[in-house]
Image (tube, helix red, strand yellow):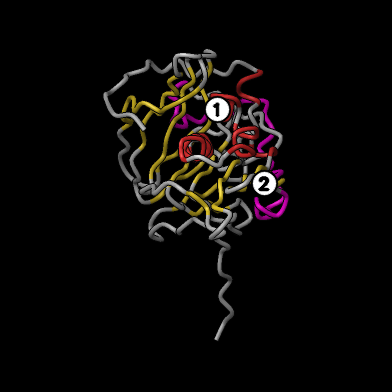
Amino acid sequence: MANVIKTAVEAGSKEADPRFYIKITSDGPYLVYGNPPIDQEIIVPNDEGSSWVYRRGKHFESSGEPTALCRCGNSRNKPFCDGAHHHTDWDPTETNSKRPLLEDAEEFEGPTMVLTDNEEYCAFARFCDAYGRIWNLVQMAEDQETRDLVIHEANHCPAGRLIAWDKKTGKPYEPAFDPAIGIIEDPEIKVSGPIWVKGGIRIESADGTSYEIRNRVTLCRCGQSSNKPFCDGTHASMKFKDDTPLEKTDVEW
């Protein structure tokens, strides 16, 4: 019997139904299979101006399978691919090491919780900055209110860079997501963010191997990340905008 190579799954994550997966093409778009819902996820700040919740925005209808999502950043039909990568000066090379995220994560230990942080995956969503910053909060997390703040801020990190863990059980606090695709918009700093892959959707490299399956992943869509296929926050410094109108709904998380 042939050996079966099993894709690694991060602790606290659960692999989505196999019909859901994303194939990265060598010099073109992301091909999304399984028709997961695709919606704008708009970052909404709190009264202090720090990122605090997501508000569901425009729903993007996709017909047929696979759905091709822009990876080069220059499509005129974002978030969908329109073939612009064929005449765009960009480097599609996948540069991520494919090492499990937690292998290179730093640990911040508090009295009741541990925070893991792999800065290489920062998507610059800034939920970690609210109410004293998460790295300070975890050090003080003895009361339930502070613990809840740490969990909220870590769980809203779309990239999964930050994970909060219960010190006693050793288990992560991880939100339960159905397989879905979010198109992040960040009007507070006037930029469009990455593609947010939720719910353990497998991501297959152009070389046929799969990246570690994680509950929260952000894929670069500005075309300029140094950690492709993942977002590294470059969209913020380059002021990437996709110019799709924001259509806010009443759905918040």
Secondary structure found at label 1: loop
Mark 2 or 1 closer to N-term? Answer: 2
* Residue 132 place in picture, x, y as percent: 59, 25
* Residue 155 place in picture, x, y as percent: 49, 40
Circle 2: residue type? Glu
How many numbered marks does the figure carry? 2
- Camera-side residue of 234 and 143: 143
- At label 1, counting other C-alpha atoms closer than 10 Å, the crowd grade (few under 14, some 14-19, many 20 or more) is many
Task: Give the labeled residue for mark 2.
Answer: 109
Q: Splitting the image into 4 quarters, where does residue 252 fall?
A: top left
Residue at 62%, 48% in the rendered image: 114
Q: Quadrant of the C terminus?
A: top left
Indicate yes or no whether the magenta region holds residue 102: yes
Residue at 56%, 64% in the rendered image: 7
Q: Residue furthest bottom?
A: 1
Q: Is residue 24 left or right of residue 18?
A: right
Circle 1: residue type? Ala
Above or below — where is 78 with respect to 214?
Answer: above
Q: Main secondary structure of the magenta part?
A: loop
Above or below — where is 5 with respect to 102?
Answer: below
Distance between mark 2 and mark 1 Cα atoms = 23 Å
Task: Give the labeled residue for mark 1.
Answer: 125
Above or below — where is 159 with respect to 221?
Answer: below
Q: Is residue 218 left or right of residue 21?
A: right
- Camera-side residue of 132 and 227: 132
Residue range in magenta is: 76-104
* Residue 244 place in picture, x, y as percent: 41, 18
Q: Nearer the viewer, mark 2 or mark 1?
A: 2
* Residue 218 place in picture, x, y as percent: 54, 38
